[in-house]
Amino acid sequence: MLALEEPESDVMSRPPRDPKAPLLDAYIAWRTLYVTILLVVAMLGIEQWELVVSGDLAKARACAMSVLVISQCLYTFSCRYVNHTALHYRVLMGNPWLVGAVVFNAAVQVFLVYCPGVNTVWSMAPIDGLR
């Protein structure tokens, strides 16, 4: 059985990280670049798709920004475990500040997209979510 997280006793018994080691090793740098490319492709892809479907640039911007925010929020949960799956309930239990930050981020995104006046400042329009 694959353990999803190490028991605290195992974590505390490990030697400390070498202070001369780089903060971003090759794997983390590759993963960051890979996820960045995926997020940009998803954001631009949904923007182009919405332009084709509705022809409304403001809605396309709102969709693109929403996809970026949702993707970043999901990626933060994925970062909790580098070598294990994030599809487990423990991802939500480990850090209550992370869950709070994601909820706050989602609330700000909803405010930016749906609040009249605010969305026009950002050149966005409300989206219906039915497509």
Image (cartoon, grey):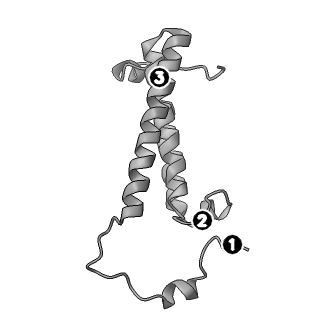
- Is residue 113 at all visible to an observer of this figure? no
The count of marks equals: 3
Q: Could you tell me if the residues under marks 2 and 1 are in contact, i.e. CB atoms within 8 Å? A: yes
| Residue 119: mark | none
Residue type at mark 2 is: His
Foreground: disc 3 or disc 1: 1
Give the percent coordinates (x, y) of residue 85: 62, 60
Q: CA distance from mark 2 to mark 1?
A: 8 Å
Under tag 2, what secondary structure?
loop
Mark 3 or mark 1: whose residue is earlier in sequence:
1
Q: Which quarter of the rendering shows the N terminus?
A: bottom right
Depicted 130 relative to depicted 76: above or below: above
Residue named by callout 3 = 47
Closer to the N terminus: mark 2 or mark 1? 1
**Considering only vertical position in the picture, is 123 above or below 1?**
above
Helix, strand or loop for disc 1: loop
Q: Earlier in the sequence, mark 2 or mark 3?
A: 3
> On the image, which quarter does residue 53 sit in?
top right
Confirm or deny contact between disc 3 and disc 1 (CB under 8 A).
no
Residue at 55 percent across and 62 percent down: it is: 96
Q: In the image shown, does 82 or 93 lie closer to the viewer?
A: 82
| Amino acid bearing label 1 | Leu
Q: Which residue is mark 2?
A: 84
The residue under the point 37% across, 63% down is 26
